Amino acid sequence: MATQPQGRDFSYFRLAFETNRALCRLGLNIDIIPPDCADLSTDKLVLAPGVATLSQPFLKALAAHKGISLISPRSDT
């Protein structure tokens, strides 16, 4: 299978690192949560930068989440 042109130089590590770096520059306190997190009730903002596979517990928690959620491209939603 050939690599799609837009994914040729994609690096998940770089995406996660740059997202974390940008949030820290904004002075935001962040928590990195496990992929099977089942409770997002204390979070005002949930970011999932390029997470390819979202677990069922996380998807359920996301459905119940009352804050803002940003699930970026390359996710399986």
Image (tube, rainbow, N blue to C red):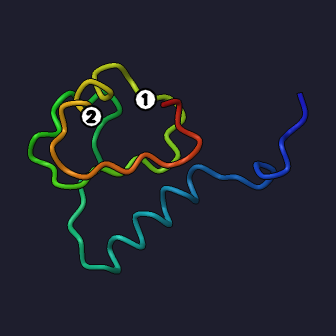
SS for callout 1:
loop
Q: Where does the image place residue 40, in percent across and percent down from the top left? A: 17, 39
What residue would you read off at disc 2?
62
Relative to the observer, which residue lies in front, 39 or 67? 67
Label 1 vs label 2, nearer the camera: 2
| Residue at the right extreme of this rendering | 2
- Outermost residue, left direction? 42
Which residue occupies 31% across, 27% down?
36
Q: Residue at the top extreme?
A: 56
> Is residue 48 shown left or right of residue 37?
right
Position of the N terminus, as image quadrant, is top right
Name which residue type carries label 1.
Leu
Dot 2 crowding, Cα within 10 Å, few <14, some 14–19, many 20+: many
Residue at image point 77% right, 55% down: 9
Q: x, y percentage for residue 28?
A: 23, 71
Q: Earlier in the sequence, mark 1 or mark 2?
A: 1
Q: From the viewer's perspective, is residue 26 above or below residue 41?
A: below
Instruction: Give the percent coordinates (x, y) of residue 51.
Output: 49, 40
Q: Residues within 10 Å of mark 1 (few under 14, many from 20)?
A: some
Name above or below for residue 10 compared with residue 29: above
Compare residues 16 and 65 and report the one nearer the observer: 65
Amino acid type at mark 2 = Leu
Tell me: 49 left or right of 15: left
Numbered circles on residues, count? 2
Query: Residue 52 in the image: x percent, y percent?
Result: 54, 35
Task: Name the residue: 78% across, 52% down.
Answer: 6
- For label 1, the residue is 54
Q: Which residue is located at x 47 percent, y 50 percent?
A: 49
Q: Is residue 49 above or below residue 19?
A: above
- Per the model, the C-alpha gap separating discs 1 and 2 is 10 Å
Label 2 secondary element: helix
Cβ atoms under marks 1 and 2 closer than 8 Å? yes
